[in-house]
Every structure is written in structure tokens, then in C-alpha cells.
Image (tube, coloured by chain):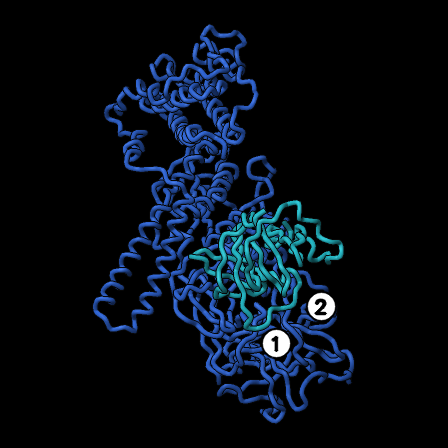
Chain colours: A blue, B cyan
Amino acid sequence: MGDLDDLVKDFLVESHENLDRLDRDFMAMEDRPGDKELLAGVFRAIHTIKGTSGFFGFSRLQAVCHAGENLLSKLRDGALVLDGDMSTALLAMGDRVRSLLSDIEHGGAENVGDDQPLIEALHALATGSHHAPAAAPVATPEPVTVPVPVADSAPAPAPRVVASPVEAHPPHPPEGEPARSGEGSSIADSTLRVDVRLLDRVMNLVGELVLARNRILQESGGIRHAGLSNAATRLDQLTTELQEGVMKTRLQPIGAVWQKLPRIVRDLSKSLGKQIRVEMQGAETELDKTIIEAIKDPLTHMVRNSVDHGVEMPDQRVAAGKPAEGRITLRARHDGGQVVVEIDDDGRGIDPGRVKAKAVEKGVISAEQAAKMSDREAVTLIFAPGFSTAEQVTSISGRGVGMDVVRTNIERIGGTVDVASRPGHGATIMVKIPLTLAIIPALIVTCAGQRFAIPQVSLLELVSVPADKVATQIESVYDARVLRLRGQLLPLVDLAGELRLTPPPGGGPVRVVILQADHRQYGLIVDGVQDTQEIVVKPLGRQLDGIEVFSGATIMGDGRVALIIDPVGLAKRAKVASRKDAGSGSAGGSGPVLTPLLVFRSPDDGRMAVTLAAVNRLEELREDQIERMGNQEVIQYRGGIMPLVRVFRVLAERRKNPRNPDAGVKPGTLPVVVHAHGDQMIGLVVGEILDTVEEDITALRPATRPGIAGCLVVRGKVTELLTIDHVVKAALPALAEA
Amino acid sequence: MQTCTFRLDGRLYGIAVAHVQEILRRQPTTPVPLAEAAVEGLINLRGQIVTAIDLRRRLLLPERAEGASSVNVVVRTATGVVSLVVDEIGDVLDLPDADFEATPDTVSDQVRPFLKGVSKLTGHLLLLLDPERAVDPAA
């Protein structure tokens, strides 16, 4: 809008604000039709727009506002009482004004159009002649003159002057009623509008100042000089305060996004034939502007969902013993460094059974998984990709984008979404989001001589594997490595490897940063771990858009740039399996649920696999370590005695003397998969370990011999999935009993 | 047209002055793993993080000798502020538009998109760079 007059710009900004308030006030008016204060406020807003548009010669705007104002003045004076038709007509007027304003914003002038039906409808309502077919605009032209301004600019009453006689109505709240709409106006005098770009610049400068401060502190640390160190301390305090102050300027109350919701709910519920009122608690809770922007759409979508799927039709509600009018409550509050936003309705809740059935039908999960799933887990399936509970696709929420998009968007800004359902009584969606995106605590790690920042929010713990324990705690199966952590196998990602950097020569302890990304946990191998710092997040240029491993960059104390790692993007790149998903079959994950498998060679160069979850460790044992207890081969292992089971001997081999059973195995050694059977470790002697893969094992092809759960194709080879329990039972019946 | 000149591998190039924000001596640069080869890394330009693109790599010229000097030409483009790394910076010349000719057909197809044309200076040629393409080949 570069060529727009500054005055017109001011007019647009002001009018948009007025319209936003108008929507809210119209909604409030439906509840309190007689509230003179509200009516006066609405009247004033429209009147101001009308006056100014006349001044600029926007004739359509002026005519539309004039018609609305006419009706409003009758309402304000008590000559008419607000009803549903009037609200609808007034809201339609608001929409028309909005669209005309946006024409002006984009084209500098009003577009051509016909407002006559709307104007006539408003006039009909104002003159009380509408109680025939309600919405049908009466064709008789009203004697009330609609001013059609002449092209050359209309007699220019300065907008402020026009407005003043109206403002002369002092806003006395009706006695006994707390001031409602007046609340905003008192702060208006002590606030001023600031261009966001200016704030962003100030914010950047403060970020710079923080870095300069860090540098000064670093450099002055080594100098003994009372004056200097006092000054440095003072600078430190001031910078911290300044930083906090500037952060606050970017905060906005969440109410800023909420105020559009009652209107959306009203329109939706009307079109669905539902009755819903919106309640808000904690609208003053403040959030960073960028976060407000980011949650706007997800929030709207969740509310639409509640209206569409949550709250029932009035007759169903009455039949269920609930009031015909449904309720949606929006709540916001601070909780630690986070903001919790809840969308709560008193509708039918989410039926775990129906959700499961739908998820199975849509192929989100298998029937088997559904059977094992708790109600709590089932409800979270609504966030799974490809899921939509709408029995019929409606124009409202069944548009292909579902709650999975909501979850993705919330997680993108470091937030989480959860849902709680009370079948028959309603559902609550709980969103937790960080206060600000601009400054986050992060752990600084090093890799191949470079520094990287890892957001603290994804950090679970730090593990250092001493050099002499590396061999026993980190298993390497070809290029896939796993870490044994408290009896669990955790997939490992080597940062240097993923980033194609050259790691320094190994040998020392291995440092692992355990990360939580989406529903997966994994260990990230880094060269070194430095400290935790508050970092200022800055975006990367468009040239680096495609690299999902980095979410941004920051400037370190020495002025150099460090990249910020995105744990989710990194996990995707490294193809880390979602263990939690695979193990419990819970919600999330896209497409089929993949299970990590360990593949080894079976005799005759066949392929066999076990689920990685059943594998505790992998060992390479020497033949000469094997001892005998009766008929049982055993081995001393970790201070205990571990029975060995020759898997291929237990399974009925097809051939008496299979060819080459030891292919790929170092002579004199045995590859052993250590499996924990309760407290007892069992060593399963297998063939050469080949690979770890992730496969969907919910649809296996039938097995051809006992001990095998079924067959699947892994990397082009038919692979048998071993049932460890069967093997153990067959080989060690006594143990299996116990 | 006011043209800021610079050298790459002994050849003279130019870029419209209107695009140039500033010239910086060599900056500490943080390499970006996994980025395309032409991306040399990220530099800190007074608190703003700016991508540095090595024009030698972009124009498929031989790698700069180790330790050889280089200069950052910070340009404003539609995709934001980007730094172009060149060997050395030359004078600003005022070249009449008429002096420019289309890039000769003999220039390889991989390089030609990054050039806007050629100007005949006395004694040698000046290749005029298209900064929008240079920072974003898809532009």
C-alpha cells in the first residue's frame, strides 16, 4: 500500500480495530440486547467509519455505514429491540465494511458493487417493516435518503469533529452493572501503536547487546580492576533488564486471537443448527507476538472441531439431560515458563471405541494394536495423520486438514497438544506453548570442531560412556548403533556422520545427548558438551530452506555463528525409529507402524530376524568360553551363568546338513543375541548379524515351520521372524516354566 | 549504469551498485553442513545472520588457493541480504547501458544463467552478474 496516503492508512488501521471490537460487541449484544453502553459503543464505531469514509469520498462505505447506523440509533434509543435478524443484518454490514476496507487497502479505491439489497434490508429492519418473510429485503425504497455523494469529495466534516457529539454521551455504565465495554478505553490513553518492524529491530539490537555484554564479561574476567569489574557487573544487570523489557514489548494478550472466535462459533453453530456460547478465562495471558501468530490457525481449527464434533444438537443434549445450549470454554494461564491454553467443551466427549474403529478402518493402526490400546491412548489417535472422526465430511472441519496438522504446527513452535475426554460430558484439548521463541535455553555441543546449539526443551539427559565401557555399552550393528541405557536399547545417531563432517580420531569417552523428538527418543553422539546458554534464535536465509536438520542459527559470545539443531528434523534424516510407537502401538507416527528388527543370516544363506526390543545386547563369544552343565551349553557372563541356545538346532532345519551354516562368522567365534527372559539372561547363538531395519510386522505372511511368527520381505530377501519365546520354551523348558 | 567491479580467478566481473549494501573484509564464517556446495557458510553481520555464497563455486571456477584473500560483497536481493564471496574488489565504473551485450553463446549453459551480459572495456571484458540468480538459482 505504498501509494496510499498516510491519512488513509491511519483510517484503515483504525477502522479494522473498530471492526474487531464490533464483532465482539455484537456477540455480547445478543446476550444483553438491552445494554445501552454496548449499543452506544457499536454505534460510535460505525459512525466514525461513516464520517471518515465520507471525508475520503468512499461512497459505498458511507452508504452501508449510514444504513447500519440508522438501525443502531433506533436500537440505542430503545425504539427497537435487537433480535436475531437484526444481529445477522448488522454482522453482514460489518463484513461488507471489512471487505470494502480491504479493497481500499489493496487497490486504493472501492471496487464496484451493489450494496442496495443489504442497505434495504437494514432500512426495513430499522423501520420495523420486516416482520414479513424475515430476510427478504423489502423492495420499497425508503424515504430515508441514502446519501449518494457526488464524485468530487463530499463536504468534509473532519472525522474527529463528527465523532465528538457522540462521544459527548459519557459512557456511564448502567447502574449495578460492572463496566464491560469501557474496560479497554482507559488503557487506550496510555498505549501507543508501534510498528512491529521497529520492535524487531530493537529486539535484534538488544540481542547484539547481550552478545557484546557476554564478550565484555568474558574478556574482563581476567583483568583485576575494581572499576572495570563494577562497570561490567552494572552493564550485565542493565542488559538483562533491558532484554526482559524488550521481550515484554512483544507480548500480546492471547485475547487478541480469541476475539475472533465467538463470531466463528456463532456462524458455525447457526449453520449447523446448534446453540453454543463461548466463555473465556485468562484472555489477558500474554504471549510473544510470533507465537500468537503461530497458534492462531491451530486454535481456530480446534474450536471449529469442538463446534462441529464436540457439542451435540440441542435435542440430543436435552435428551442427555444437558441444557440445550452448549458451552465452549477457552482458558489460558501461565505455568512455569510456558503458557497453557485449553479448549474445553461440554459436548459428547470422544468415544475411544469409535475412535479406535475409525482408526482401524482408515488403516492408521491395526485391529490388534487397537485391542491392546488403552482408552487414554485411543483418544490421542485423533492427532494421528489421516484421521478424521467426522461421520460425514462437513464444510466446517472435514477439509482434509485434521488435528494432525494442528499438532504439527504446535510442535513446530516447541509446544505440545494433549486431549482428555469425559465421554458424555465433554472433552478438553490442552496446548502447552513456550512464552517466547526468540530467546531459548540451549545446550552447546561441539562436533568436528564446530559448535551447535540444541534446544533444552528436547533434552532428556547427558550420558558419557567411559572409553573402557564403549565396547560393552555401545553395540554396533553395521552402520546402526544402539546404546544400552538402563536395560533399554536406544538408537544412536552420530552427529558427525549425519552432517557428513570428519570426526576427530576416537578413543576417548563417547558423549551422548539423549533427545526427545516427537514420540521418539534417541542418543546423539557429539564430540564434546559445553554449557547451557540463553541463545537468541535467528532465522536462516532462504538458500538453506531445504535443510531440515537446522531450525535456525544464533550468535555466540565470541561473535561467531552457531547452528541450532532441530531434533525432529535430525531424527527424520537419520531415520530413527519411533520406539515408543513401535512398542506400545500408541498414536502418532505416519503410515504403518514400523518395528525395528535385527536381521541375521540363517543356514543356507537364509535370512532371519528378531525384534530389536527383545534384544538386550549383542556379543561375540569365543568357542573356548563355552562350558557344559550336563547337556546344557553355558557361558560365564557378567558374573552369572548364561545358558546358550543354538537357535538353528532348535528350529527344525529343513536340511539335515545345511550348507555353510557359519558363513560370515569369524572362525572360533559365535554371534550371540543376549535376551533377557525375566531376570535370566539367555544367549541365542545365531548366524552372522547382518543389519537392523524397520519394517511393518503387523501383516506377516504365514510361517512354514514352528518357532517362526511369519515371513516378510526385507531388502528383497524373504526373512523369517523368529518367535524367541518358542525357541526358549523348546530349548529350556524348565526355564520357560519358571 | 553504476557498476561495482570485482575479480574472480583473474577475470573481471561487475554487479549493479544499486544491489550492493556494503563490502566487508573476510569474516569468520560458520560452515553449514549439508548445504549446497556454493554456500560457504554463515557470517554475523552486526547481529543479522547472513548466508555467504562463494561465487567461485557458483560460477564453476577453480577453488581459491588456501590462504588466498577474499572479500564479502553484501548484496540486497529479493531473497534477503546475502554475502557474495569474491577474490578482490575493484573500482566502481559508470558504464553506459549501450556498452553491454548479451552473454556469448560459448559461455557454458551452467554458468550463463548467472550472467546478465558482457561489457567491452578497453583491453578486457567485464561480465555482469545477476545477483538474484547468483543467490538463488531458481529465481
* Kind of residue at disc 2: Arg
Give the side of residue A37 with respect to residue A735, left or right. left
Give the side of residue A390 with respect to residue A453, left or right. right
Crowding at dot 1, Cα within 10 Å, few <14 / some 14-19 / many 20+, comes out as some
The answer to whether residue A325 of the structure is visible from this angle is no
The answer to whether residue B66 of the structure is visible from this angle is yes
Quarter occupied by residue A220: bottom left
- Residue A27 at x, y percent in the picture: 41, 28
**Label 1 SS:** strand
* Kind of residue at disc 1: Val
- Residue A719 at x, y percent in the picture: 71, 70
- On screen, residue A53 above or below A226: above
Q: Residue at x 59, y 70 (%)?
A: A500
| Mark drawn on residue A715 | 2
- On screen, residue A293 above or below A670: above
Q: Earlier in the sequence, mark 2 or mark 1?
A: 1
Chain containing the residue with disc 1? A
- On screen, residue A52 above or below A434: above
Chain containing the residue with disc 2? A
